[in-house]
Amino acid sequence: QQSDRDSRSQLDKTSMKYGYTPLAFALALLRRSYGFVPKMTVRMASARFHATSVTTETALDELATMTTLSIDSADLDVVAKFAEKGLITDATTNPLFVSQAGASGDKRYEDMVFDAIMYAKEQRGGGDSPLPDFEPELNTAMDKLAVNLGAKLLEIVPGKVSTEVDVRLSYDTKATIERAKGIIDMYQSMGVDKSRVLIKIAGTWEGIQAAKELEKKGIKTNITLVFSFLQAAAAAQAGCYLISPFPGRILDWHKAKGGKESYHPTADPGVLMVKRMYAYFRKYGYNTICMPASWRPSRGASVQGSDVDEILALAGVDEMTIPPPLLESLMSKGASEITRECDAKADAATCCDPDFVLDADKYKAYWETDACGQEKLKEGIDAFTKSTEELREVLITKFG
């Protein structure tokens, strides 16, 4: 009994550090360690800690028993709201979120911006050089702002945060590696262990090769803007920790190219592509995590409840990053609406893809035939570049 009380006391102290109830923290750790939490565990934990707020009554609760969940937001209040439920383990950011934080006017974010600018001036000699030579200061400030935001999110979620390398370097392997190492150094200077940070890199061949080198140095990577099986296979072969395929944007591409206006969720081209990636990873023993993001209504926006079609169709995949509005939609649905659609053994058995070894020449040859991958990757990089440039302009006005 004394041992049990000691364990309970330690859990209470640790959970309070992250702002969790003991139950929420325990469940989040189970999801991070094992990838799922059995329903019985939830019920037993509720009884043990005398809590009733965490149940498997909603679709979100049920989904969290089979898939690790990351929140796709940098709004600290919103992230805290969902993290308190013990269902969200990780957080994902992107250049748009960082840009919005920089321009928000909220004092918490303003303080992050001020700290980033002061840091850049200290590191780069004051920031008083002419504008053409001002880029190092701006780049350092942008990275530090992203790190400040990520560190604050890590005070809320118990798992990991993804922080993106400047997307304008997507085709420069060496520069990506150097900026990534700098980001990790910034996190470590704030007392954040690098094991809690995923360096987010666009899924170009050059970006994947940068990730390969970073993984060798013990820096975990998240290959984002993945629209092609080719990108997924290359990332897995490179030893990347995680990929972020975008089923919704794959669906957009198929619709734009004359595909149907609506699909049954299990026949959605984006869903099928993610399942193909997941099956390949599991069949050939790759440890790369498949974390889909960017969702669309398979059956069309006019169909009630269709906003989470793709999410439901991929239930059971390793991890998902989901924006707050869709988390709310899942909370409005019953647990019975979720069934496991991704299973490691079953999906591995359906994989028909060979484990072909990719090099730069082979990748380029295959890539030239992948219209969806090419078009959507360029579109994604262009959109994130625009957000990065907007952040740059915000920071220029704040340097003084």
Image: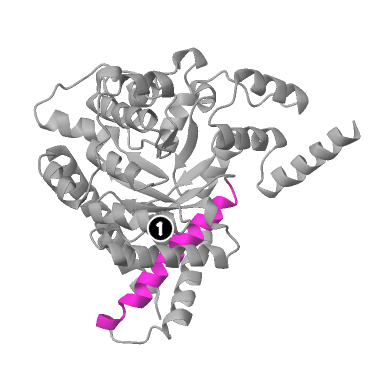
Task: Examine the rendering and report whether any part of residue 228 can be seen.
Answer: no
Q: Nearer the viewer, residue 59 or 340?
A: 340
> Does residue 295 appear anywhere in the picture?
yes
In percent of width and height, residue 384 lies at: 28, 54
Name the residue at 56% across, 44% down: 159
Residue 138 position within the rendered picture, expressed as x and y whole percent measured from the top left: 35, 73
Q: Is residue 213 above or below residue 136?
A: above
**233 relative to 109, above or below:** above
146 drawn magenta: yes
Query: What residue is shown at x 36% (from left), y 54% (from top)?
Result: 211
Q: Which residues are magenta?
A: 131-156
Is 18 positioned to the left or the right of 167 in the image? right
Q: Identify the residue position indicated by label 1 in the image.
A: 214
Q: In this rendered view, identify the residue nearer to me: 1 or 60.
A: 1
Image quadrant occupied by the C terminus:
bottom left
Q: Quadrant of the N terminus?
A: top right
Residue 326, given in percent of the width and then of the height, sits at 41, 31
Outermost residue, top side: 336
The image quadrant of residue 217 is: bottom left
Q: Nearer the viewer, residue 270 or 173?
A: 173
Give whichever of 6, 132 is nearer the camera. Answer: 6
The verdict on residue 241 being magenta is: no
